[in-house]
Image: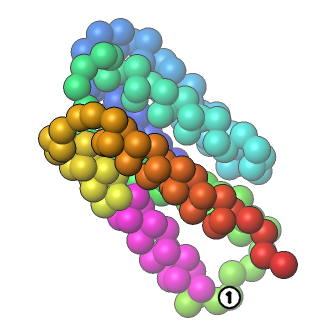
């Protein structure tokens, strides 16, 4: 919950306009996340994170791409993983300290990979490679390939 509060505080402090509204929405989102973890109510956990991401997009306005976007994405991913993990281990005795260390390292690795992937995508979008039908077709082919990879990974194993 500290991670969500930190993200919310950063969003509130960097908001150029509507700072009180941003602060109120962030406070409600963090309280909903705390409620979802404290009860435990796992289906409530994603919604405060969606609200935080929406507030982030709102504070950007219509300006240029924010260089901090990958960091926010990694932070939101880490908060989500930690929230679900805290709901998962509720009521169970944790005697395997080594498994806890593995889970923490997995969450940290996932967050760092998200930041790195976001930075790579951000860097790739800033390159000037020209324009034309061939470039558009290459972009469409890459998008279709990305969706195919996600679909293949999401398919349940038999």
| Residue under the point 40% across and 26% down | 57
Please name the predominant secondary structure of the magenta segment in the image. Answer: helix
Q: Is residue 111 shown in magenta?
A: yes
In front: 100, or 124? 124
Element on which disc 1 rests:
loop
Q: Quadrant of residue 136?
A: top left
Q: For the residue carrying disc 1, how many other residues have a C-alpha within 10 Å: few (<14), some (14-19), or many (20+)?
A: few
Viewer-side residue, 157 vs 135: 135
Q: Nearer the viewer, residue 34 or 113?
A: 113
Residue 118: say if magenta: no
- The answer to which image quadrant residue 63 occupies is top left
Q: Where does label 1 land, which residue?
A: 95
Query: Residue at point 24% right, 49% down?
Result: 124
Which quadrant of the figure has residue 139?
Answer: top left
Classify 148 as above or below 7: below
Relative height, residue 151 to residue 15 (above, below): below
| Picture coordinates of residue 122, whole percent (x, y) | 27, 46
Residue 80 on image: x %, y %: 56, 52
Residue at 75 percent across and 79 percent down: it is 93
Can residue 3 be seen at all in this image of the molecule? no
Query: Relative to residue 5, is residue 103 drawn left or right?
Result: right
Quarter of the picture containing the C terminus is bottom right
In this view of the protein, can residue 84 be seen by the observer? yes
**Colour pattern of the rendering:** rainbow
Furthest toward the front, the residue is 133
Q: Position of residue 64 (x, y in %)?
A: 22, 26
- 97 lies left or right of 95: left
Task: Tell me the residue at 72%/40% (across/down).
Answer: 44
The residue stretch that appears in magenta: 99-115
Coordinates of residue 47 in the picture (x, y in percent): 64, 35
């Amino acid at each position: 919950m500290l991670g969500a509060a930190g993200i919310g505080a950063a969003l509130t402090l960097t908001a150029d306009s509507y700072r009180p509204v941003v602060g109120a929405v962030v406070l409600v989102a963090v309280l909903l996340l705390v409620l979802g973890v404290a009860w435990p109510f796992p289906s409530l956990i994603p919604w405060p994170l969606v609200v935080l991401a929406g507030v982030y997009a709102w504070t950007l306005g219509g300006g240029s791409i924010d260089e901090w976007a990958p960091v926010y994405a990694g932070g939101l991913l880490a908060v989500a993983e930690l929230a679900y993990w805290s709901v998962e281990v509720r009521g169970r005795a944790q005697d395997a300290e080594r498994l806890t260390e593995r889970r923490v390292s997995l969450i940290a690795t996932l967050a760092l990979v998200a930041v790195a992937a976001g930075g790579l995508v951000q860097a790739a979008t800033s390159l000037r490679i020209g324009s034309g039908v061939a470039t558009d077709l290459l972009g469409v082919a890459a998008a279709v390939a990305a969706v195919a990879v996600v679909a293949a990974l999401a398919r349940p194993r038999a």
